[in-house]
Image (tube, coloured by chain):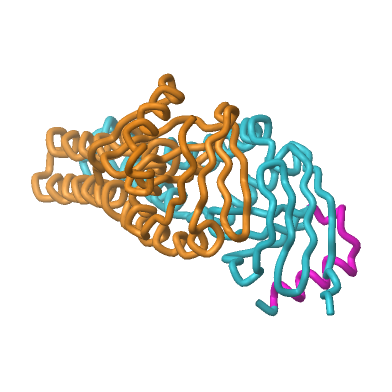
Amino acid sequence: MVPDCTADCTREEYVRARLITARCSGEMQSPWISAAWIAAALLLGMLSLSEIGQPGYRAAVAAVFFAAAACLAGLFFWWIPVRLRNRARQEFETFRQLRLPMRFRFREDGVETTSALLSCFDSYARIRELIETPELLIFRRDGAGFFLLPKRCLPPDTAQQSLRLLREEFARHRRTMKTWIF
Amino acid sequence: MEQRPVCQCSVLLTKEEFTAFREENWRAEHSLAALIGGGALLLLGAGGWLASGQLALSPLLTGSMAALGLLWIAQDRILRPLLVRSRAAAAFDRQPEWSGSAQYVFYPDRVQLRTARETGEIPLSALTAWRESKTMLALFFGRELTVLLPRRLLTPQEQNDLIEVLRAL
């Protein structure tokens, strides 16, 4: 059994976890749809370049589509992540107030997390996946909810053993993410 | 001296209430950008097609613009609300904190709660937003907790008292 531990995560860790979960199951889940919209705008730009007879007007129409493609790329790959990051910084304040420091107790059937104000139980069946980054363990619940355990909070003497046990427990629902794109 | 509760209730949501709330919430937070963008594209496409003689725009280009605009509006106004509802229905089935019963006791400065997932007492100062609709009162504590109170479970007096407390925060 994984030993109990207490997590006191920082704002940066929370924001990183929030972005990763948004990428896996939330606001930024569909990069292919975003890419399809951008491709459609680019395609229309190409079409207008190749098919219109009046040179001056053709360039203007094409420019509109290329500008739209650039705007969409900026929206999907810059503005939405920036907005999400800012929102996550605000959400951290509530998280800190209600959940930190968070005591983890790994039971046979699930994880019990307790703070000064709330105690909560999630069965392993309801934890969708364990996302592991070099610094964090993110337990993604059904929906976009998550709780996170920074690896630095694992008891030093049993950290490796705890990681091994958690990887075994979530062997079928585990993903590793090394970097964060966008 | 112990504080008197503003209201207390035991909540058991129906799937219809929950999915309707999720859709309503999505609509409240959803911007009109897609509708405006799609409408503009549709108008440009239709205008370009009608004036194609003067502008020398090909039917392929104007048709593509109009189709893209229509697709964008349809995705935003028809497909996404349907997706929101179906995801909400799936979440309701999977997550016992929505489908299970919950007890809430509201005091002027805090709320005691016992749900299928969580137990505790949290200060109302942690409330980040609240919303009232015809059928529901919703309290949001960041992303950590959402309290849904169907109005049918509260007397008009309790609803007024609770709203007064929330407005005073």
Region rendered in magenta: B150-167
Residue occupying the point 36% across, 54% down: A15
Instruction: Answer whether residue B158 is magenta in the image.
Output: yes
* Residue A28 on image: x %, y %: 37, 42
Can residue B147 be seen?
A: yes
Please tell me whether residue A38 is drawn above or below residue A75 in the rendered image: above
Helix, strand or loop for the magenta stretch, by majority: helix
- Residue B63 as seen in the image, left or right of residue B54: right
Which sits in the foreground, A169 or A130? A169
* Residue A69 on image: x %, y %: 23, 45
Residue occupying the point 41% across, 27% down: A165
Chain coloured orange here: A
Which sits in the foreground, A120 or A47? A120
Residue A174 sits in which quadrant?
A: top left
Residue B120 sits in which quadrant?
A: bottom right
* Chain B drawing hue: cyan
